[in-house]
Amino acid sequence: MSRPLSDQERRKQISIRGIVGAENVAELKRGFNRHLHFTLVKDRNVATPRDYFFALAHTVRDHLVGRWIRTQQHYYERDPKRIYYLSLEFYMGRTLQNTMINLGLQNACDEAVYQVSAGAATSLASAACFLDSMATLGLAAYGYGIRYEYGIFNQKIRDGWQVEEADDWLRHGNPWEKARPEYMLPVHFYGRVEHSGTGAKWVDTQVVLALPYDTPVPGYMNNTVNTMRLWSARAPNDFNLRDFNVGDYIQAVLDRNLAENISRVLYPNDNFFEGKELRLKQEYFVVAATLQDILRRFKASKFGGTDSVRTVFDSFPDQVAIQLNDTHPAMAIPELMRIFVDIEKLPWNKAWDITKRTFAYTNHTVLPEALERWPVDLVEKLLPRHLQIIYEINQRHLDHIASLFPADVDRLRRMSLIEEGGTKRINMAHLCIVGSHAVNGVAKIHSEIVRTQVFQDFAELEPEKFQNKTNGITPRRWLLLCNPGLAELIAEKIGEDYVRDLSQLAKLHDFVDDDLFIREVAKVKQENKVKFALYLEKEYKVKINPSSMFDVHVKRIHEYKRQLMNCLHIITMYNRIKRDPTKLFVPRTVIIGGKAAPGYHMAKMIIKLINAVAQVVNNDPVVGSKLKVIFLENYRVSLAEKVIPATDLSEQISTAGTEASGTGNMKFMLNGALTIGTMDGANVEMAEEAGEENLFIFGMRVEDVAELDREGYDAQQYYDRLPELKQAVDQIKSGFFSSNEPDLFKDVVNMLFHHDRFKVFADYEAYVKCQEKVSELYLNSKAWTKMVIRNIAAAGKFSSDRTIKEYARDIWHVEPSDLKIPPPNEPREVAEDGTPNGTEARA
């Protein structure tokens, strides 16, 4: 929650964060006091921030529940096409402040809590962008995933090294979720397949139960509240007990943990496929539970209905769209075929036609090591019937290819779902492409690489199947919530409608030369920087100059994202200051943050190197306040909300052709940072929208990288030719930054010279020269801020509302709705089947 409003701000009551309103405040105060009382806090003076948080969360949830029930009633009565978004991970963050903004309660809550207790302010966060946009656009959408007991690990930095700690995010409870045991479903593993005259039967399986937890996802000011349903694994009561003897009872109960481990922990997304059995279990678990749920909802078409009323599946693709977010939920394709063929007894061809028309697949990476390729032996053990179905899909697919390209054996090998040679593997991306009616990348350049390189054979066969859907971010969270000063400044200039239609930011072009607006934009940025500088000083005990350029590089630590190139630039700046301390130098605070996957040795070495460099730079009296380096510990959504509004320069420097899209780049752009970046991912479209002259673009393009690959990349020649690069590398190599252990970074240096697929040295010179242009512009505050305004004015394309509209129209074939469902305090007509208002909604 943001700070309490001043008297002047309370009078202002800007409505993009909700009208304060005396009735709203009074009602919220009553609810807040009631829930605070239920926490058994007798003396409010000893209430903890957590007590206030839960009291406020439950108060806001009370406002949400009526709208949630109404929305589900509305869907069951109207029976619209449902959109199902399947993902193995949702970066939810915390939900309170996002919910308050979308319900229009932000200011009223601030005021109510201010009146009840001035000490209750705390910083809170929100939900995944696409789900937010689906609700805001009135789509009947559902997010499905796993309710992980432990999320992505908490990162601690000890002596410069990353140390992982468990993220026990549920230890204090979650006020937003509601368990729905009445919708618990069985999921089967292992076993064997029996074939008979009536078809195939999967028998002797081990059962794990999937218990759903529902979380509300409110749209912005439209009373629509959609559902995110996350599954938790539970062992059935008879798990391993059927054949126990007295001595085995305790062990049998303890073995229940094996079943429940499925939803225990989130695998870090490190762009590297490991092929662990538990991960495959997770992937099938979410798919099997979700498809049962989807089929139940499809059959019970009318709200309040208790019988399955749909038994014919011809209309299934007209009522159901399933979006596979990456290949992780790919087992949904053979699972739906199993349901249709084995259980519902549909003929194969009909089942396959329905399945293909139902699924669509979003590709998220072009890195070959990240693509999922499951060993056939593992799938045969865990999901024997699914392997048979995949073989049948593949055989029919290859027969079709062979009929089109007779005797082209190499093409058959390239396009097969099964990779032969060594360990036989299932290529899950190929399964997704063959089993879907649409395939999309997440930025223009990425979709082009997908179409012309990664899946070229498939695109030649079915060119109409391949599309682009450039990623977007929700402005509710990534502007209104995290940067209210800028959000309100924009609203004063162009009105409030931009929150729902971000393309209206283009109106800001009219104010690029408005001196007052330029000063106000610069003032908001400076206020955010001062606030963040205080946070950094408190957390890291490093004195920060708020007037210095905040140069920020925050994302997962990975070689392709090239944090090493940034590190080489830091060392270069350090050496320049040391060489001539009297020379004019534009002060910088370089902020790097991100987590390395626990098993990714090189990424962990990069973190250690950055911290070692920071230790030297920050403690050198010659450097003083000219250059500071901070590694942000445990970078996460709530920290992003602090750093992004305070950033001057956003680092988006991946090797061209490696970053699918990126969304951090968009968040920085919307919040008034300028971008230094390569022509990669969504940077390309940001440059198109704002004009390349309004970004700091440098380095190789995709075609240059390809040319260098053909010629052969030789790191040594850059090292020999560029004295500043040589000096920086020699310092790393000699132990200048690790005097107690001179060889500490030998693996990093060895990689840079001999195994650097991402060609750091090749772009170093262009990067350093581009950074000099950045410093030069930063000296001219007015020119810098004018460029900032041009960037904000060009950010309208990058709203997730626009992205979801494109998915809706081009892939799901539904139209967004601006219908506003009546709130719970307004009368509502009785449903057609006579269901009275207030009946709890079916899920």
Image (cartoon, rainbow, N blue to C red):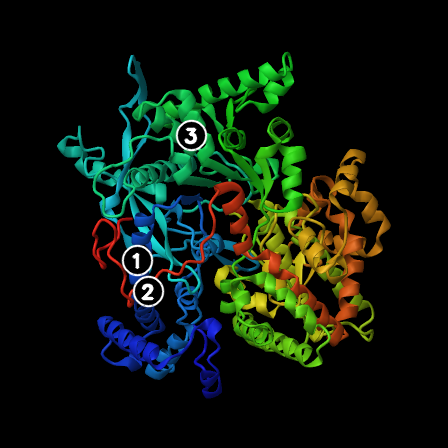
Q: Which residue is mark 1?
A: 70
Disc 2: CA contacts within 10 A as few (<14), some (14-19) or many (>=20): some
**Three-letter code, disc 3:** Ile
CA gap between label 3 and label 1 equals 31 Å
Disc 1 residue type (three-letter): Arg
Contact (CB < 8 A) between labels 2 and 1?
Answer: yes
Numbered disc 3: secondary structure: helix
Report x, y in % for residue 759: 73, 45
Q: Is residue 291 left or right of residue 244?
A: right
- Alpha-carbon distance for marks 2 and 1? 8 Å
**CB under 8 Å between callouts 3 and 1?**
no
Q: Out of 720 and 528, give the one closest to the viewer.
A: 528
Quarter location, residue 18: bottom left
Callout 2: SS: loop
The earlier-in-sequence mark between 3 and 1 is 1
Q: Residue tagged by mark 2?
A: 823
Horizontal arrangement in the rendering, residue 603 relative to residue 288 (left or right):
right
**Looking at the image, is 464 positioned above or below residue 546?**
above
Amino acid at dot 2: Pro
Give the residue drawn at x 63%, y 16%: 405
Q: Which residue is mark 3?
A: 354
